[in-house]
């Protein structure tokens, strides 16, 4: 029977920093719980869903901190391109 390599991609092997909305807001005071919930509510329109930054477990919403800030950087780059 041939063996199949099961190594995970490097991006998924690193531990992710997953925070609840309230934990994220406490860690990053620039983001209120209300503003985060609004971003999550509109995530299908603003690209946050596609970024993988929001994890949905039943009614619970969790934020992948690194993915959120990657998404934010992409939004900033997109805004700069549109302004030029």
Image (cartoon, rainbow, N blue to C red):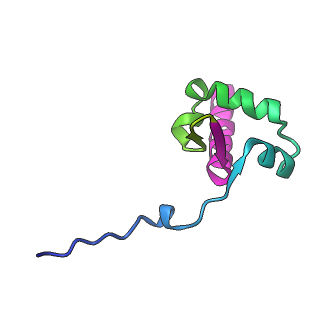
Q: Position of residue 67 (x, y in %)?
A: 61, 49
Which residue sits at x=67%, y=44%?
73
Whether the magenta-drawn stretch holds residue 74 is answered as: yes
- Magenta-tinted stretch: 60-84
Q: Quadrant of residue 34?
A: top right
Of residues 23 and 71, the one drawn nearer to the viewer in this rendering: 23
- Left or right for 69, reference 2: right
Which residue sits at x=65%, y=36%?
75
Give the farthest residue toward the left.
Answer: 1
Viewport quadrant of the C terminus: top right
Q: Position of residue 25 (x, y in %)?
A: 82, 44
Vertical arrangement, residue 14 with respect to residue 1, above or below? above
Of residues 28 and 76, the one drawn nearer to the viewer in this rendering: 28
How many numbered discs? 0
Magenta: main secondary structure: helix
Q: Position of residue 55 (x, y in %)?
A: 58, 43
Whether the magenta-drawn stretch holds residue 43 is answered as: no
Which residue sits at x=68%, y=34%?
80
Of residues 62 and 31, the one drawn nearer to the viewer in this rendering: 62
Give the farthest residue toward the right.
Answer: 29
Q: Quadrant of residue 60?
A: top right
């Amino acid at each position: 029977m041939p063996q199949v390599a099961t190594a995970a991609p490097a991006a998924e092997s690193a531990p992710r920093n997953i925070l609840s909305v309230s934990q994220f807001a406490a860690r990053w005071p620039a983001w209120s719980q209300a503003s985060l919930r609004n971003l999550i509510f509109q995530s299908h329109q603003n690209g946050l869903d596609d970024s993988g930054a929001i994890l949905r477990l039943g009614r619970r919403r969790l934020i992948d901190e690194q993915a959120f800030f990657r998404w934010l950087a992409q939004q900033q780059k997109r805004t700069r391109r549109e302004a030029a």
